[in-house]
Amino acid sequence: MENKYSIEQIKSAHKILKEFTYVPKPVNKGYSGETLYVNLSTNEIKIKQVTERMKDVFIGGRGFGLWYLWNAVTEKTRWNDPENEIIISPGPIGGITQYPGAGKSLVVSLSPITGSAMDSNVGGYFGPYMKFSGFDAIEIQGKAPKDVVVFIDGDNGRVTIEEAPLEDINSHIICEQLTELYAKDEADRLHVATVASGKAAEHTLIGHLNFSFYDKRRKGTRLKQAGRGGIGTVFRDKKIKGLVVRTTNIKGNSNTPADQALLNKTGIKLHKEIHRNDDKQCHMRTQGTAHLVEIMSDYDLLPVNNFKFGSHEKARQMASWVWEKKFTQGIPDGCWFGCTLACAKAVDGFQLKTGPYKGDKVIVDGPEYETVAGVGSCCGIFDPDAVVELNFYCDTYGVDTISFGTLTAFAMECFENKIITEKETGGLKLNFGNHEAALELLHQMARGEGFGKVAGMGVRRMKEYFVKNYNADPKFLQDIGMECKGLEYSQYVSKESLAQQGGYALTNKGPQHDEAWLIFMDMVNNHIPTFENKAEALHYFPLFRTWFGLNGLCKLPWNDVEPEDNPKTDEPAKVPEHVQNYVDLFNGVTGKKIDKKELIRMSERVYNFQRVFNLKMGFGTREHDIPPYRSVGPVTCEEYESRKDRYDKQLKEKAGISPEGLSTEEKVKKMREYREKQYQMLVDAVYKRRGWNEKGIPKLETLKDLSIDFEDVVKIVKSKM
Amino acid sequence: MISVNEQPLAWRENLSVSELLKICKYSFPLIIVKIDGEIVAKSEYEKFMVPDGANVSVIHLMSGG
């Protein structure tokens, strides 16, 4: 589809609503020391100073985002109030080019789907470019009356809010338009990074943000997604069409680190390790995270038909080798400079079969594992081309592939159970495996029409809607609706791992695997058999992984490639050499002297603060940490029978109940009683380890110990006890 | 009989580590195999025979997107 307007027309239609000039502060030891505040209701633009306390307690990235959001909203603020903010921050390490995976941005906002603070991490160039333009974070508040673009000109120290009536909304078009518009010439496009969303973000609660980077080899913009929690919906509600930053200040030492030599040494070590080991280990450079598809199916962890099952014979139609052929090879696909793990794979020249861009040949970023499992197997879809098409449209329409997959799978199960019929779906035959129906549902979301609008509310609201309007059984919907805290589950079957049930439901933002992925450690290795063992893992790993989000780092170089001698270490699951790399990176950039214990403490402060943030917004207590039963065990007799031997054995050996003579229905019930009790015991152990009371509220001594016993924090905690 | 990650498994003659991994469907690439506490190098998986009564640990390191 040709762009409706030329770049000249788009440019001439821009009207500058506010211009602000500043002197860009050079970054020193990872921080510029200033952040940018933009209010779209009043067109106020100002600079805020980064205090030493902010750096000490909140570090950067997700920490800065939570701190600014905390101060911006009250317990009454809702996601679509002007007071809500979108904060983007890369963190102090973010932007170094010596170590793989160091270009992440963290986006924080009140989520439309959970009602509380959401954090989402994303690659692309925007965060680092913003920092090298002089800002450790951008904080956007207010709502514009008409569509706007916010432009940061880092070379000339100028920020503008511009009325932007003619750009497209959908990301694969607008990101190209904005890149061309703000670049001086073709070569300069590399210096421009953009953020956009899409049409479906306007009509659903699961909107995501696309962060672009210009791919000079493909001569096009690539898109990485801040997927979780509906921040794209907030973005479009604020009438933001795009954020743009342009800077030529992109050098290997733009962070002005305290010890450049240490960064160089640490980076070279990992580059060599990747070069030696990736082809023998995870094949990230050729397959990206899609290398996991057949592995997850082998271990009964791949969600199939709304998480009913964990494997499928057709999973091999979407296996790693299929994606390796589809992905263009031989291109260093890093989403930030210097990332030799290079997992940002793409399908080039993909010809679309449906929708408004039917017939167009496009670049499709991904699919990554989560997308293959979400819009694919979870919906019973095993056609790789359908997955690529769904991936493309989710991206350009601004919809999170994880939430879309999980909510579509839920709607499909409701359809197959006749809770909804073609009458309610407007003729969509939402059977598992019907990719045409899934695509049409997505197009409806973009058009704001039909059943797409209902589904776009997410699983939690769909459950309420079906109960209210279609007389559905609320208990059954609660069991099969894969959401917790309002957020849709990401794509791993957790039924056989008690630790991962907690890894999902005991998260701050909702069930997303970026806090903890403990399934192998628990279910396969049997390394954490006791409640105390599991609680320790649910203390360490969420905190370790939180740290990446404070610093602008990607998780993948931590343990998707490993040193040859890692098996000989005391704690191979932690990859000790890489943990030390991160300590060295932090010290090398900031000049501080942390060790691996302090690394965890840094996260612990922010993690507990986020828990209190949930309390402030009316959540954050035990009843919000309970998963749907589909995440814990077999809901239906069909599920039980599909793994009958396993479940019968567990009933007998673990629960001490003889399955002899029991009907399947009775066995499902007994199994449920056993597993739900186990889950509650896990919650008790985790709360104790985390220093929380039995309601899940951080104890005052925990807050004091972590030095986050600020007056307003303590007040909220006391009011909830 | 052998034990694999604390679970009993029937032993048979000429059971190599490679064969054992296939039986268990352990296809994940980042694993460590220990037999009676000793690490078996990946290059040895084809020819290393698992003895009867062995205590086998197949340690899967975490991954995930």
Image (cartoon, rainbow, N blue to C red):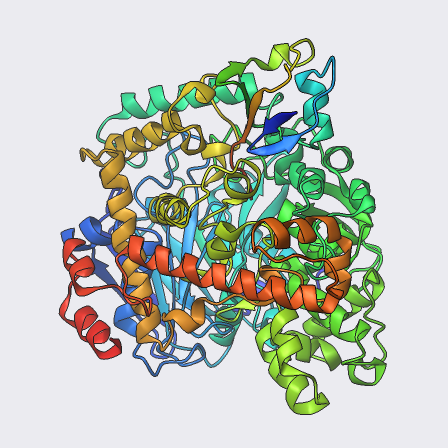
Q: Position of residue A253 (x, y in %)?
A: 32, 31
Q: Report if residue A17 is visible in the image.
A: no
Describe residue A714's horizontal placement relative to residue A496 as left or right.
Answer: left
- In the image, taking residue A392 as reference, residue A252 lies left or right, namely left
Residue at point 68% right, 8% down? B47
- Tally the numbered discs: 0
Residue, x 70% and y 29% (percent of image)? A329
State whether residue A547 is above or below residue A591: below
**Residue beneath the point at 46% across and 36% down:** A101
Judge by depth and name the residue closer to the eye, B22 or A428: B22
The x and y percentages for residue A624 are 44, 71
Residue A412 as seen in the image, left or right of residue A92: right
Q: Position of residue A123 (x, y in %)?
A: 49, 46
Residue A76 percent coordinates (x, y): 34, 83
Quick check: A56 left or right of A209?
A: left
For residue A179, above or below residue A510: above
Q: Nearer the viewer, residue A695 or A242?
A: A695
- Relative to A642, residue A662 above or below: below
The answer to whether residue A645 is visible is yes
* Quarter holding residue A662: bottom right
For the N terminus of chain A, give its image quadrant. bottom right
In this orientation, which residue lies closer to the viewer: A444 or A306? A306
Q: Quadrant of the C terminus of chain A?
A: bottom left
Residue B29's image quarter? Answer: top right
